[in-house]
Image (cartoon, grey):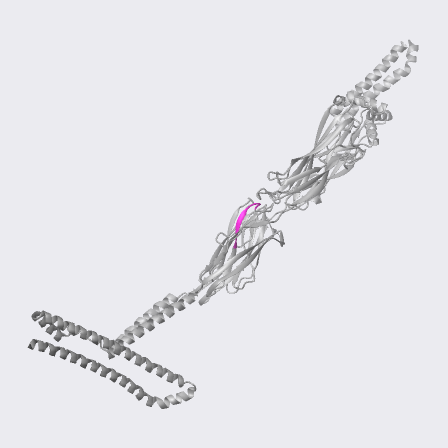
Amino acid sequence: MGGTAIKHKKSILAIIVVFFLLLSTPNQIISAKAIDQEDMKNVGDISGNTTSSGGSLRYFLGKILAFIIPINQFLAMAAKAQPEVIDIGYGENVTIDVGLMDVETGEFDTRGVPFFLNARSINFEVLEYPGGNADGSWLVSFDPPVIRPKNGEEIKSQLTISLTAPSNPKNAIKSGILKIKLKDTQAYGNLWFPPELPLFQRLLWSTSAIFTMRFGKYSGTVDTEERIIEILVRVKPYHTVRFEATPLIKLNPGEIASIPISLQNLGNYNDTYGFRVVSDYKGIKISNPVSVTLKPGERKDTLLGVAVSPNVLDMGTLYTVRIETYSIDQSNVTIAQRTVFLETRGLYVSELGWAGVLLFCVIIIFAVAFFLHRHRKISIKFHKKPEKPWDIPEKKEYLEELRKEDRKKYNTVLDEMRKEYRSSILSYNSSRKAMLKEARKIKTKESEKEKQQTPDIKKTKEIKTKESKPELPQKEEKRKSVIEKSAEMEKQRREQAILKIKKAQEKQRRKFGK
Amino acid sequence: MTKLVRSAKSTIIIAILLVSLFAVSASVKAGPFIRLNSNIDVSWGEKDFEKPVIPRDEVRRLNLTVKYKVDWGGDIARGALDAYVNSGKSALINLEVTDHSPWCSVNLESILVPVPLSTELKTSSVFLNLQLNEDAPAYGEGYVKIRASVGVMGLIGGFDKEFTLDFIAEYLPRISVSMPEGNTKEVSPTESAVFPIEVSNMGNARTTVFFKIDNIPEGWTVAVTDDVTLDEVGGSKEIAYLTVSPPKGFGYHYDEQSIIVTMTPARAEDLTNQGEPSYITVVVGSRGFSTPGFESVLFIGALLAVVVLLMMARRIKKK
């Protein structure tokens, strides 16, 4: 028995060594759990400890274990975009590369189809647009749209992104994330025992395929891996504004008015607009419209202040005023402009003018009143209007008697009286006109004389002083002669009238006498 | 007997190896079996966030430093780690933005960061891009949560941790001004023109708007509300008043003046943080007579004088 034990001494020793090695594993577990795994700050750059007894054996065993359980990253995949941040504006295109990334180098993958795959294809689709794509503002295309990877060629596609202004300005496009889905379709070959590998590696592969990783079951299947690529798209601020058409604006001279000008933000962000007025007219004073802030698509009025100069009479002047708009973010860039047409027409009378007109009217009224008053006075003084004969008391009595006695005779007498009155009125009017004419002539002569006497003031003064005394009697004489003439005429008229009356009375007497 | 012992020996060895193999495989999935654990730390430069991020216009490119190391203990672990290091493998660290403030857009340069396996601490870097919407609240704290994880790699255990990155948004001053009663007025020289100015906040913080008038015309008196403070809520309104009094000298007036009001928004909490000014221009016309104010007394006096004169004239006539 003892001899048998000596014979198998080597085998027993090997078993004991393996037993001890296995015994050390609980220590590994305990030591690993004792360390706070997540607190990197408590651990130095190099962490770990080794034991002295049997260290080299365990170290060797570790290497063997690492060999048996390798790090398997052949299914590790990632997608990338280059660049991953883009700037784009309305009406612009940007081209970038999207594809699969080599996880080791960080560059685009060039490994094509790995030995464990029979076939592979990669295609792309847009998963999410920044701010949505309801208006079709985003246009994304891939070149090529589907990739059939080949060894040595980068697995990537050129992505072209176009952005156009949305049809509805309210749906403004703003910055955000463009998400692209990359579909990697893989047809697996023989994963149990791949013939491409050398025999030893094939054995290890098979061990993993069967026991450890257990991926052998995927042999002959088609799998689709999806990867999301996120691209940060910064949509550049688009400063633009639309002016509403403004009709011809009519203003009166001296008017001050606020003219509303409607505008709409066609940009993609909240924007504040300032204005510059280009006008070199002196007849109107124009103030810059009020700064206005608008949300995308918002419409609002701003006010252009206009003060028209007070031309007394404006037959119609056309002014063209150009309004330039800028965003306060870029005050030196004019983003839109609009010409406003203004027409000034009308009559302007200021308050002072109205007061003048009123004063003028009052003066005119006073002058007319004075003239009438004076005229009436003269006429009363020099020409008494003939009285109606039938209103003279004596004649009235006579007529009364006649009416009672003889009706016929009464009528004839009354007719005579009327005729007589009419003729006297006519002569009165003619004489009055003649009088007025004469008076005017005298006045004009006097004024002419005065004008002739003005050349030398001193002389005229001397002449006036000298001739003032003799001139007065002349004037008085003239006036007297005029008065006398008119008195004579009046007398004559009266005499004629009396003669006529007498004649009529005689006729009547004769008739009565018969 | 020898045959029996030999077969027993080989069976035991294979059995032990197989048991250890499966035991390792099972323990790796459940947790670390050998002390080989991944450890990740993500950090960023504090200087990168010293300045607040400007909403809308800025894309802040932030360099994230990804630190990776393997914690190991014991000879087996060291032996295995050395084997992995010698194979030239890298730890593939997954980075994922799990959450962020709703008013910002974030992406990473790469979601997979390879860090070479080493017995020492290794670092790698990746860029994080951050862009803020224009409604980002000024000086309000924003956040980005990044999950860093690495799966099990052979005997090396996995790791998963979330990091939170904080930042602040810059003040974006923006005000909207309207004049409900127009920007022109005509008054008599004795009156004053009052213009209400309606100011709305379209910025991202409580805003104080300062009003200032430059070049007041000679002889005119112009006064405006010094300042108004608008709440942060978008579109909150306040009304300021501009009062313009024309010259009041005796006589007839025909004056016209343009007055420019400058409005400068500033963050209410820090009035030195000011934005671009906005302007309004008003036109005021002053037309009419300006009387000294006691003209009614003069008129009554003149009327009395006329009456007295008329009475005197009558008396003289009677005499």
The location of residue B25, given as percent across then percent down, is: 77, 23
Above/below status of B88 relative to A377? above
The location of residue B122, given as percent across then percent down, is: 78, 36
Query: In the orientation shown, which residue stands out farthest toward the front?
Result: A514
* Camera-nearest residue between B90 and A21: B90
Q: Is residue A51 left or right of residue A125?
A: right
Does residue B186 appear in the picture of this structure? yes
Q: Is residue B294 left or right of residue B69?
A: left
Magenta-tinted stretch? A295-303
Task: Decide whether residue A504 is among the magenta residues.
Answer: no
* Camera-nearest residue between A243 and B303: A243
Above/below status of A488 relative to A109? below
The location of residue B16, given as percent across then percent down, is: 82, 18
Q: Is residue A213 left or right of residue B105?
A: right
Task: Decide whether residue A300 is among the magenta residues.
Answer: yes
Image point (79%, 18%), residue name: B19
Above/below status of A260 relative to B168? below
Above/below status of A21 relative to B138? above
Does residue A36 appear in the picture of this structure? no
Q: Count numbered badges in the picture.
A: 0
Instruction: Locate residue B156: give its quadrant.
Output: top right
Image point (13%, 70%), residue name: A411
Quadrant of the drawing holding the C terminus of chain A: bottom left
Image point (38%, 83%), residue name: A448
* Camera-nearest residue between A136 and B39: A136
